[in-house]
Image (tube, helix red, strand yellow):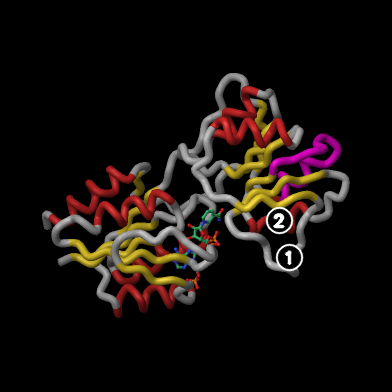
Amino acid sequence: MMRLLILGGTGDAAELATKLATMEGVEVITSLAGRTREPLVPLGDLRIGGFGGVAGLTNYLRVMQIDLLIDATHPFATQISWNAVDAATIVGVPHLILIRPPWEKVSGDRWIEVDSVEAAATVLQNQAQRVFLTVGRQELAAFADLKDIWFLMRMIDPPSEDALVPPGMLLCDRGPFTLNNEREILIHHNIDTIVSKNSGGDAIYAKIIAARELELKVVMVNRPTIPLVDYVTDVDAALAWVFDKLQY
Ligand code: NAP
């Protein structure tokens, strides 16, 4: 029996856990940071909350006798990914990153690419009036000083009461989102600019298609650097990696 830890928080992580839970010879534990009030619960075991840095994760891998580690966290969750590299190296546990390819700009896209959420806020000044902000609850403060812009802010859970939030309206919802849904939002709220992280994948790509159709600007936050270790870009490839390890 091999015990596998999945660092989760994404749809791909949940899908992978669910598929692995039915695989003979594998015991799956998914770890979530605990940011979402009602997370999607995958099949297999679940633990919630930070480990306590590299030392905590190293200890967890040892105590739980983890044989394989798959980091299927969001492309913008870099701290946990770097911690995973270090902890897996220290313990000597085989480690894989599952990361969706980034979206590529295509003909008709009006993207302004930036390297951080703070840079996205700077770009909005003087060129946006009504913004669809889809970078997540934890990033709202970067936009809080933009008092002349109206924001439609979509996130899974509302921000805490003391959070710095820009002017506008909250929309609490969880993907996937259809093209009709996204088109309707953009038109109804008279949006002129979208701000998005380059998350990749299909579940939330419809807003990018809708922006293209409506010729709206998208301020696209490029991905941070991730560790250059073994990686795959889809769930099937991750399953193949696990299957391969089971042979030895
Ligand atoms: P982060 O900055 O990389 O991590 C900050 C700390 O949160 C880590 O050092 C770790 O605490 C804890 N942590 C993160 N992911 C964890 C996991 N799967 N299991 C246990 N602890 C975890 O992460 P983040 O950007 O705050 O993202 C948190 C979670 O939300 C991740 O699971 C990610 O997949 C998901 N998510 C993030 C985004 C995004 O845009 N950042 C979007 C969608 C989903 P310790 O050091 O104490 O271990």
| Chain part drawn in magenta | 118-132
Q: Is residue 155 above or below residue 53?
A: above
- Three-letter code for the amino acid on which mark 1 is drawn: Ala
Q: Nearer the viewer, residue 73 or 180?
A: 180
Q: Position of residue 215 (x, y in %)?
A: 68, 23
Tell me the CA gap for discs 1 and 2: 8 Å
Judge from the rendering whether residue 239 lies leftward or rightward of residue 161; answer left or right. Answer: left
Question: Is the residue marked by circle 2 packed among few (<14), some (14-19), or many (20+) residues within 10 Å?
Answer: many
Q: Residue at x 76, y 33 (%)?
A: 190
Q: Secondary structure at mark 2?
A: helix
Q: Is residue 116 magenta?
A: no
Residue 87, quarter of picture? bottom left
Judge from the rendering whether residue 124 lies leftward or rightward of residue 199; answer left or right. Answer: right
Q: Position of residue 7 (x, y in %)?
A: 40, 61
Q: CB of mark 1 within 8 Å of CB of mark 2? A: yes
- Three-letter code for the amino acid on which mark 2 is drawn: Leu
Q: Nearer the viewer, residue 119 or 44?
A: 44
Q: Is residue 119 magenta?
A: yes
Q: Mark number for residue 140?
A: 2
Q: Is residue 40 above or below residue 151?
A: below
Judging by the rendered image, the residue that carries numbered circle 1 is 163
